[in-house]
Image (cartoon, helix red, strand yellow):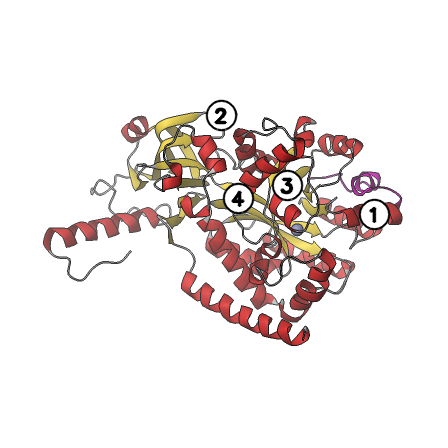
């Protein structure tokens, strides 16, 4: 917020008051020294925050939408939901987000990402997978991915995810300790994978080394921060053999953490699996007991009917990544068939090198459109189904539905406000339709995670965006120069 020096008298007093209100709303829970939004010293019973909206899209089991509503937040939790007049008559609050032209809904769940790859956004596009990987992505990673790269790239990703209303993401990359430190300071919620891969990677020598280092990371972060869940991220069944996959599952079960893995992503993987193991990917996972524990499977583009049954029985959380699947030409995931069979399906962006952004609104829109044109049936996937995949259904797919994914009393307060000031929301007949078919990341007005404000009216409260932009641009310049020299 900027204050004009020429402001005088009543105007400057008003501005000062607004500044105090804004600071009050951003203060950590328990800070009772600030002035309330009514301009009074709050009483000891004042709750932390009230978030108002013309529509409260709860994404609860009943699909309830409350007109002119509010959500009461205290101690990081949602403690009440109702009409704004009900909530305001019951509570005083230290902070308040006004609801005019605002939709309030649960934060979005990005079920599959490689956050730090934002630094490789647009480094090479429109290439065949192996050309893209071997001549651009892998060389850039080998030469440049270190702890500093991961710190800057993850900060850039957190900035973009906060901008777009994502409040939880599932990440798979290198230097997970660094990712966790960034997530801790930026305020988001994340599952952070220790990547397991049987090749020399930026932070490990081989599969055994990555499991060992992964365990150290998990022990370091388990139960340390309510927002951070350390997990194992075995890369895929074409970068790990059956023994290594089994060893990773055993280590994950011993540590009591879930697994996230690329699963049945491409025709290449399908062929490789048949030739190497004599069966398709999910059959292999089932046959070696790899699915004996919480599992998040990214992509799942090529499952057989039998494999879809296995996914449903094993309650594997499938993460659909429509943009990445289209851009790399991996194929069209049979999402509607999986949903019909009872598979838990969420949405993800994949890394920004194959997307090229982290906009979950775009994923929602593309998920709906892709199924419709694939099945040549516009009724096959509704806006409500897609919105559910990005919120409540997504949180169920990653095993976090008891904490987040809906606006329900007792869940953690991961809440966003979407502005419908922009022309593309006019007129508004059906708010769910607009959220899926119209909204984009620039429409998000405020983001709250665990009851703490991370963005307020487009202002970032936990990230120094100027510094991140400067550092990311400088590093990208070095990557571009190195690739140009290499590919001369
Ligand atoms: Zn991926």
Which circle's residue, 2 or 4, is located before the other in the chain?
Answer: 2
The range drawn in magenta is 278-294
Mark 4 vs 1: CB contact within 8 A:
no
Disc 2 marks which residue?
Answer: 63
- Quadrant where the image shows the N terminus: bottom left
Which circle's residue, 3 or 4, is located before the other in the chain?
Answer: 3
Graded by Cα atoms within 10 Å as few (under 14), some (14 to 19) or many (20 or more), the crowding at tag 3 reads many
Mark 3 vs 4: CB contact within 8 A:
no
Disc 1 marks which residue?
Answer: 271
Residue 376, given in percent of the width and then of the height, sits at 64, 30
Q: From mark 3 to mark 4, how far is it between C-alphas?
A: 13 Å
The mark lying in front, picked from 1 and 3, is: 1
The mark lying in front, picked from 3 and 4, is: 4
**Ligand 1 is within 8 Å of the C-beta of the residue at disc 1:** no
Label tally: 4
Which circle's residue, 2 or 3, is located before the other in the chain?
Answer: 2
- Per the image, label 4 sits on a secondary structure element best described as helix
Inspect this view and state whether residue 449 appears.
Answer: yes
Which circle's residue, 1 or 3, is located before the other in the chain?
Answer: 1
Residue 211, given in percent of the width and then of the height, sits at 73, 56
Which circle's residue, 1 or 2, is located before the other in the chain?
Answer: 2
The mark lying in front, picked from 2 and 4, is: 4
Q: Looking at the rendered structure, which numbered label has been put on residue 320?
A: 3
Question: Is 212 displayed left or right of 472 in the figure?
Answer: right
Q: From mark 2 to mark 4, how far is it between C-alphas?
A: 22 Å
Which one is in front, 320 or 78?
320
- Per the image, label 3 sits on a secondary structure element best described as strand
Residue 330, given in percent of the width and then of the height, sits at 70, 47
């Amino acid at each position: 917020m900027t204050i004009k020096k020429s402001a005088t008298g009543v105007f400057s007093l008003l501005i000062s008051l607004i500044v105090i209100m804004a600071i009050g709303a951003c203060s950590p829970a328990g800070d009772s020294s600030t002035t309330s939004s009514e301009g009074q010293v709050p009483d000891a019973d004042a709750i932390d925050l009230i978030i108002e909206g013309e529509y409260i899209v709860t994404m609860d089991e009943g699909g309830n939408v409350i007109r002119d509503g509010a959500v009461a937040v205290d101690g990081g939790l949602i403690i009440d939901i109702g009409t704004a007049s009900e909530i305001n008559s019951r509570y005083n609050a230290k902070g308040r987000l006004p609801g005019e032209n605002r939709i309030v809904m649960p934060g979005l769940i990005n079920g599959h990402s490689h956050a730090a790859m934002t630094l490789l956004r647009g480094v090479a596009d429109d290439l065949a997978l192996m050309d893209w990987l071997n001549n651009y992505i892998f060389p850039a990673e080998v030469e440049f991915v270190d702890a500093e790269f991961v710190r800057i790239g993850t900060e850039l990703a957190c900035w973009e995810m906060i901008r777009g209303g994502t409040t939880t993401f599932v990440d798979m990359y290198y230097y997970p300790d660094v990712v966790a430190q960034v997530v801790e300071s930026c305020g988001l919620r994340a599952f952070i994978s220790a990547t397991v891969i049987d090749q020399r990677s930026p932070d490990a020598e081989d599969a055994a080394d990555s499991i060992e280092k992964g365990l150290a990371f998990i022990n370091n972060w388990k139960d340390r921060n309510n927002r951070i869940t350390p997990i194992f991220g075995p890369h895929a069944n074409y970068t790990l053999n059956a023994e290594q996959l089994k060893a990773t599952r055993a280590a994950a079960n011993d540590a009591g953490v879930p697994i996230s893995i690329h699963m049945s992503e491409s025709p290449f993987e399908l062929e490789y699996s048949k030739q190497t193991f004599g069966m398709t990917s999910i059959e292999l996972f089932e046959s070696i007991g790899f699915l004996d524990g919480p599992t998040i499977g990214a992509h799942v583009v090529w499952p057989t009917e039998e494999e879809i049954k296995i996914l449903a029985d094993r309650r594997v959380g499938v993460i659909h990544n429509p943009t990445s699947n289209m851009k790399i030409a991996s194929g069209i995931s049979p999402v509607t068939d999986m949903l019909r069979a009872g598979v838990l399906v969420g949405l993800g962006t994949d890394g920004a090198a194959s997307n090229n952004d982290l906009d979950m609104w775009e994923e929602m829109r593309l998920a709906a459109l892709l199924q419709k044109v694939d099945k040549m049936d516009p009724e096959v996937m509704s806006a409500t189904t897609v919105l559910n995949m990005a919120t409540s259904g997504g949180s169920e797919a990653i095993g976090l539905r008891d904490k987040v994914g809906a606006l329900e009393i007792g869940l953690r307060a991961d809440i966003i406000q979407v502005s419908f000031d922009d022309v593309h929301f006019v007129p508004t007949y059906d708010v769910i339709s607009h959220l899926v078919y119209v909204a984009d990341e620039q429409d998000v007005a405020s983001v709250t995670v665990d009851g703490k404000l991370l963005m307020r009216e487009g202002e970032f409260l936990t990230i120094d965006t100027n510094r991140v932009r400067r550092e990311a641009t400088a590093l990208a310049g070095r990557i571009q120069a190195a690739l140009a020299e290499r590919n001369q």
